[in-house]
């Protein structure tokens, strides 16, 4: 116990008993010699005084008797009924070891002033001032928040089930863990949650579409199964054309209705041309055969119907895709990556997401861990370096990140990063953690409740979030806005068409000039 470090004060009240009286603003008990100290009544619950001894919090009381100063102590026992709304807890002389992790929006530590800031940090500083204790700030030993680890973590001869700040609390290396720590069931088995300061969503970040050259942009309006269905339908109609043409006799001239025999090659080429032109709704024409004229007309009507629906829907989807200002994402939620073999999932290293997915009993989360996370380069990724995050996104990873942390990455790289519309999980509660069954836990919860009821925590959140939003950038890439990357395929087709045209032109020149001359020479030579 430190001398003169503790005082007991409470509101003055009326005389308690014949042998007791109250004088001034401090309690002053005048008792007879035979009055036992246990029978002295307390006159209030405000400004209670405590100190730490052998890892326990002791409450200290001072009374003045008629002849001598009387003092006694007893271990602190907290009951919900004793925590009045206006109670204030003075922990003067108590020095707490606080482990911390830094992130700008939630918690920052100034090593010169030795103070915390951010939503959680500022709230903690107010609680420290109100409760009158001091701290010894200790950085997290491994940079992790606290995830359950197979085999545990051994540090200084003590093993814990968790790493990070939660592991430090579990091994009793610190008294308080100060970071944007989420409330989860596995964590509260080994540590106490000190109360909800702010709720935090879980966002899934994805590489913003449109930054890379879109070679398949003109195929994107339809999904693969639709393209396969269209191809299957067109193939069936083409086979029907070949079968019908094989039994319909000779092709007739549409003007004179005279028999006009065609070679097998030309007949096949004509059927393919008829199929393509009818499906694309370009210059439809009817093949005139001797037999089955009605059947041919029905076939053509089928072509027109299928082609019209396909072409019109495709044109509408393509126009919407190329001109829409909204981002067209390949997936809508995290679980959708199970249907995409080229996509992988990156979890925030050391966060509760790793524990939640790795040890989940749900089949979809087990598949996510085994197929998309485990063994991959960025399956568990730190969020300290933006270059690493951008590299993972470029390699088609979906990154699951937390609230302001994820939004800050989007704010710094608005042209490269966006988020899925559906959050990965329900918002989680953030707050400080204390050692399991710590006597400080009810005191911190009560003090936090007072600050929330007074609107202090809300004002801190509003100020920090406004500051964060003002620091976000806006995408100004003109190519991304115009969607030029999506038109690359069109230029490829134009280029191939030009090359094909010149190739055919050269072949025609050779056929019309070189070959006849060669034939003429051969004839002269033979004569």
Image (tube, rainbow, N blue to C red):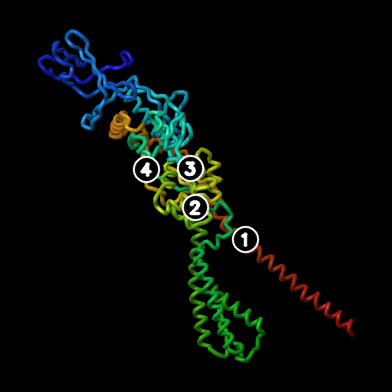
Residue linked to disc 3: 411
Residue ID at (44%, 27%): 138
**Pointer 2 residue:** 371
Find disc 1 in the rendering and name its residue.
491
In the image, taking residue 296 as reference, residue 57 lies left or right, namely left
Q: Quadrant of the C terminus?
A: bottom right
SS for callout 3:
helix
Mark 1 vs mark 2: which is more N-terminal?
A: 2
| Picture disc at residue 428 | 4
In the displayed structure, does residue 513 sit left or right of residue 25? right
Q: Earlier in the sequence, mark 1 or mark 4?
A: 4
489 vs 7, left or right, is right
What is the distance, in whole Å, between disc 3 and disc 2 at their CAs? 30 Å
SS at badge 2: helix
Residue 374 in picture, x, y percent from top left: 50, 48
Dot 2 or dot 4, earlier in sequence: 2
Residue lying farthest to the top in this orientation = 67
> Residue 61: image x %, image y %?
24, 18
**Foreground: disc 1 or disc 2:** 2
């Amino acid at each position: 116990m430190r001398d003169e470090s503790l005082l007991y004060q409470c509101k003055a009240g009326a005389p308690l008993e014949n042998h007791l009286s109250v004088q001034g603003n401090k309690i002053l008990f005048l008792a007879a010699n035979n009055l036992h100290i246990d029978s002295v009544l307390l006159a209030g619950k405000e400004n209670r005084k405590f100190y730490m001894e052998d890892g326990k919090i002791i409450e200290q009381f001072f009374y003045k008797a008629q002849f001598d100063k009387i003092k006694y102590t007893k271990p602190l026992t907290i009951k919900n009924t004793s925590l009045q709304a206006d109670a204030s807890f003075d922990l003067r002389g108590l020095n707490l070891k606080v482990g911390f992790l830094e992130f700008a929006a939630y918690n920052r530590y100034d090593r010169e002033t030795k103070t915390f800031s951010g939503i959680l940090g500022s709230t903690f500083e107010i609680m420290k001032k109100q409760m009158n204790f001091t701290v010894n700030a200790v950085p997290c030993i491994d940079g992790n928040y606290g995830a359950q680890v197979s085999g545990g973590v051994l540090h200084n001869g003590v093993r814990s089930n968790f790493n990070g700040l939660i592991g430090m609390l579990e091994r009793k290396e610190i008294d308080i863990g100060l970071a944007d720590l989420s409330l989860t069931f596995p964590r509260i088995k080994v540590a106490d949650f000190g109360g909800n300061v702010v709720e935090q969503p879980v966002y899934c970040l994805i590489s913003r579409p449109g930054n890379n050259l879109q070679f398949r942009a003109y195929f994107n309006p339809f999904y693969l199964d639709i393209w396969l269905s269209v191809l299957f339908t067109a193939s069936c109609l083409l086979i029907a054309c070949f079968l019908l043409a094989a039994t319909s006799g000779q092709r007739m001239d549409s003007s004179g209705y005279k028999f006009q025999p065609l070679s097998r090659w030309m007949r096949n080429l004509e059927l393919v041309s008829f199929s393509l032109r009818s499906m694309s709704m370009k210059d439809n024409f009817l093949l005139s055969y001797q037999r089955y004229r009605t059947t041919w007309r029905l076939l053509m009507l089928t072509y027109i119907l299928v082609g019209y629906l396909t072409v019109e829907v495709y044109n509408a989807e393509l126009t919407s895709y190329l001109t829409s200002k909204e981002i067209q994402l390949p997936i809508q939620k995290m679980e959708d990556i199970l249907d995409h073999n080229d996509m992988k999932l990156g979890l925030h290293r050391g966060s509760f997401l790793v524990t939640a997915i790795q040890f989940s009993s749900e089949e979809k989360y087990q598949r996510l861990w085994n197929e998309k996370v485990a063994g991959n380069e960025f399956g568990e990724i730190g969020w300290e370096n933006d270059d690493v995050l951008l590299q993972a996104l470029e390699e088609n990873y979906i990154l699951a990140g937390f609230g302001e942390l994820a939004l800050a990455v989007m704010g710094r790289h608005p042209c490269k990063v966006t988020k899925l519309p559906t959050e990965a999980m329900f918002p989680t509660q953030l707050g400080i953690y204390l050692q399991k069954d710590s006597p400080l836990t009810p005191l911190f919860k009560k003090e936090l409740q007072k600050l929330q009821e007074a609107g202090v925590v809300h004002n801190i959140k509003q100020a920090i979030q406004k500051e964060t939003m003002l620091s976000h950038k806006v995408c100004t890439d003109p190519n991304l806005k115009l969607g030029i990357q999506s038109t690359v395929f069109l230029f490829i087709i134009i280029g191939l068409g030009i090359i094909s045209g010149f190739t055919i032109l050269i072949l025609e020149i050779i056929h019309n000039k070189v070959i006849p001359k060669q034939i003429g020479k051969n004839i002269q030579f033979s004569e």
